[in-house]
Amino acid sequence: MNLVVIIGLGYIGLPTSALIAKNKIQVLGVDINEDVVDTINKGKIHIVEPELENVVKKAVESGFLKASKFPQKGDVYLIVVPTPFKSNHEPDISFIESATKEIIPILKKNDLYIIESTSPVGTTEKMKDLIYNSRPDLVNNIYIAYCPERVLPGNVLEELIHNDRIVGGINKESSSKAAEFYKKFVKGKIHITDSKTAEMCKLTENASRDVQIAFANELSIICDKADINVWELINLANMHPRVSILQPGCGVGGHCIAVDPYFIISEYKNESRIISQARKINNYKPEWCLDKILDEIKQFKKQFNRNPIIGIYGLAFKPNIDDLRESPALSIALKLLNTYTEDKLMFVEPNISFHNKIKISTLGESLEKIDVGVILVGHKEFKNINIRKENIKWLNFVNI
């Protein structure tokens, strides 16, 4: 193996590139964003991920990692591009198609082509047909497989190394070839299946988590109405040896759990009843949180005859990262900006310094000014906030 070409240098593509390069395998990372390419070639990173910058720096300095806007001939090709939605949450695989079309002219016999992007069931087979129709000389002469990432932002490098991987090829030879490749840098077990099962496995994992979170979020709404402390309730219920309820929050965000269930729903609308309902519950939770905040504003104004200064704590979709993708906290913040006085809002997000629509304040300055504090994300910086401070009313939508 002389060169691995990775198309897409985002939250998964860049750590994967760095990890492979760390194992002294030549990697060319490809991205359409020139700033991203330039940043990586300087040994720096454009995302927040613990330890990643150090690994990228060493990989670039050692010559095993380079970035470019254009692919070149390699031996292994990884497609790690976004799969956004069309209207009505229909999956859009056009980025995968574009990336595939870009490398079709340079593919050669015995190359390994792998999709890592989250994909609707059957996408790998579609890309196989696209390659074969464009290059009949490659029919049964290259290896094609699907291998989804299954990592947690904030711990990506460790999980890329130690998590088990599901590898599904279009045939047994492709599965074996892809498994052999991942064994070069993955210490977790490699489980072999077919491409459609591998695609569905990724979607199933995150749909399952979405359903479990929906239960916790629905429970929090019920407990609020029943005047029950949901955190205490869940702690007590989880003392049962066969019960493990998750913690509720202000919704579900990120590039996986809030997205992947729709890949199933779009294809199996009549069959995916529980999955569909879970999505509705988790999509409703930010609206419910916003209503609670607006109600608190009304109560404060009624009591003190003035509008309160509101502190919003957390904008990312989960604790201790800078990722705002599909963030319910961010959606709440933006809706507040549209419904409340901007000069009465302070937003604290320790992991970002700038947002084009929201002015970011520091934790310290906010605590000196706010009347009502709203904790939307359980960042570590918020753990020591004195929520019993008498001059501030707190609304906690996460358990800190």
Image (spheres, rainbow, N blue to C red):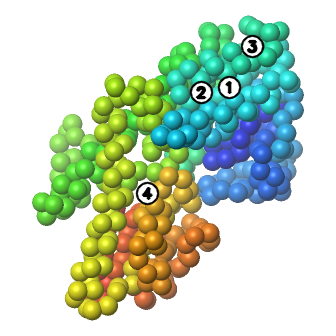
Identify the residue at image location x=22%, y=88%. Answer: 303
Place of residue 27 in the rendered image (x, y in percent of width and height, measured from the top left): 80, 37
Q: Residues within 10 Å of mark 4 (few under 14, many from 20)?
A: many
**Residue 370 lies in what quarter of the image?**
bottom left
Q: Are marks 1 and 2 in contact (CB under 8 Å)?
A: yes
Disc 3 residue type?
Tyr
The residue tagged 4 is 328
Marked residue nearer the N-terminal end (2 or 3): 3
In space, the residues marked 2 and 3 are separated at their CA atoms by: 20 Å
Read off the residue under disc 1. 114
Q: Nearer the viewer, residue 92 or 77?
A: 92
Q: CA distance from mark 1 to mark 2?
A: 7 Å
Q: Nearer the viewer, mark 4 or mark 2?
A: 4
Callout 3–callout 1 Cβ contact below 8 Å:
no
Mark with earlier residue (3, 1): 1
Q: Amino acid at mark 2?
A: Cys
The residue depicted at 30 percent of the width and 33 percent of the height is 274
Left-right relation of 81 to 132: left
In-image side of 82 versus 335 (left or right): right
Q: Is residue 232 above or below residue 395?
A: above
* Mark whose residue sits in front, 3 or 1: 3
- Identify the residue shown where x is 30% and y is 60%: 288
- Which quarter of the image is occupied by the C terminus? bottom left
- The residue that mark 3 highlights is 132
Circle number at residue 147:
2
Q: Residues within 10 Å of mark 2 (few under 14, many from 20)?
A: many
Task: Give the mark nearest the N terminus, 4 or 3.
Answer: 3
